[in-house]
Amino acid sequence: MTAQAPVLALTCGEPAGIGPELLLMLAAEGVAGARPVAVGDPGLLAERAAALGLSVELVELSPGEAVPDATPGRLPVWPVALRTPSRPGVLARANADHVLETLDVAIRACREGHAAGMVTAPLHKGVIIEAGHAGFTGHTEYLRDACGVEEVVMMLATDAALHAERPGWAGGRSLRVALATTHLPLCRVADAITAEGLTRVLRILDGDLRRRFGIAAPRIAVCGLNPHAGEDGHLGREELEVITPTLAALRAEGLALDGPLPADTLFTPRHLEGVDAVLAMYHDQGLPVLKYAGFGRAANVTLGLPLVRTSVDHGTALDLAGTGRADPGSLRVAVALAAEMAGRGPTQ
Ligand SMILES: NC(=O)C1=CN([C@@H]2O[C@H](COP(=O)(O)OP(=O)(O)OC[C@H]3O[C@@H](n4cnc5c(N)ncnc54)[C@H](O)[C@@H]3O)[C@@H](O)[C@H]2O)C=CC1
Ligand SMILES: NCC(=O)COP(=O)(O)O
């Protein structure tokens, strides 16, 4: 008997953004290897489908009810009502709680075993903060807190194997970039690079590359923080005082770590040879490279969680919402990656 494809909860994200229409596009073309369920407002999905001429039958279910095999043109939905009507491209603070509720439903479904993982369409951080959730910085930290873990790691991956067979793929090279710090103003980054934090991040990265990605002996290249990795202390001392001793201690535990290396040369083919993941010190040190290598063909993964969570590599694209011109490529990759990770067996 063949095992059924894993159920994946796909949150619709910001209702005024491109998330709802990306889910509909994916449902219209069909999904192999997973049984996706949208988490969002069925009325909104029906409206967007009609506006874009997408023929998708929406089937309302509750978490725990049997989810049918994926069929092109059909999308099961776990309903979460909008708080106020939504127009493409127009943010409404009143819907911030709707967006967070879709996350809560998906998290609960994963934790109660009704879904094998969750895939999140993009939300708009600013409108959620303006709606009164002052400490909100993104899915990554929200999931960390909801799951009660101390640390999580954001990693974006352009896994060529997941999409090489897709027409239009021009990236070729697989690249995984994880971040030592995530959504932090640049002026606070240096202080946030601590031996304790780096140790937690690298242990999670090494552990999840083994457990979630099936890499038996991962090799991780670690960026310095400063230009030229500090130039022997002349251009910054974080490498000498924090990063180098932390890597040495972790190497003694058996982790295969290169670095700290100057970030400008680390991201060149020769230095990436044989490297399974790069750890960048901050968001805009690593992600521009990743997006240059494969924007629209990469996925974001949260490591260190007791559940599988992937996401797209882009934001809400309010400028494209409702036009039907948004590219569902990254959502395809995010779903395929979540299915692959879920297929590696139960979480802790
Ligand atoms: N996983 C998530 O929830 C993420 C959410 N965001 C949030 O999204 C909001 C907007 O962020 P921005 O920096 O403007 O980035 P963005 O990714 O929304 O837009 C940047 C540019 O890329 C284009 N683009 C984005 N997705 C596309 C797609 N699927 N197909 C074709 N073109 C696409 C947009 O039209 C725009 O020109 C912010 O609130 C940000 O925090 C950003 C990244 C990830
Ligand atoms: N640039 C990646 C990003 O902002 C993703 O944020 P998150 O909502 O997945 O934490």
Image: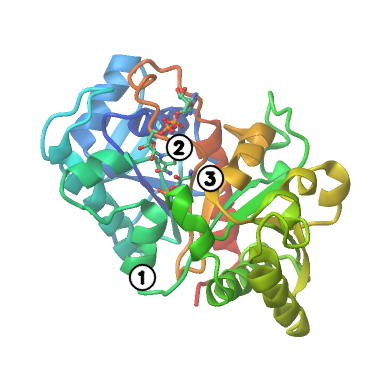
Residue depicted at 69% across the width and 54% down the height: 235
Residue 94 visible within the image: yes
In the rendered view, tell whether residue 255 sits above or below residue 73: below
Label disc, if present, on residue 71 of the rendered structure: 2
Please state the quadrant of the image where ligand 1 appears.
Answer: top left
Which kind of residue does numbered mark 3 sit on?
Ala
Which of discs 3 and 2 lies nearer the camera? The answer is 3
Query: Does dot 1 land on a helix, a strand or a loop?
Result: helix
Q: Are marks 1 and 2 in contact (CB under 8 Å)?
A: no
In the rendered view, tell whether residue 238 sits above or below residue 5: below
Residue that badge 1 annotates: 147
- In which quadrant is the N terminus drawn? bottom right
Residue depicted at 33% across the width and 67% down the height: 145
Q: Earlier in the sequence, mark 3 or mark 2?
A: 2
Which kind of residue does numbered mark 2 sit on?
Thr
Q: Around disc 1, counting alpha carbons within 10 Å, would you say few (fewer than 14), some (14 to 19), or many (20 or more)?
A: some
Horizontal side, residue 14 vs residue 214: left or right: left
In the rendered view, tell whether residue 28 sits above or below residue 309: above
Residue 224: x and y, percent?
Answer: 69, 57
Label disc, if present, on residue 334 of the rendered structure: 3
**Label 3 beta carbon within 8 A of ligand 1:** no
| Direction front: furthest residue | 234
Query: Does dot 3 land on a helix, a strand or a loop?
Result: helix
Near-viewer residue (167 or 320): 320
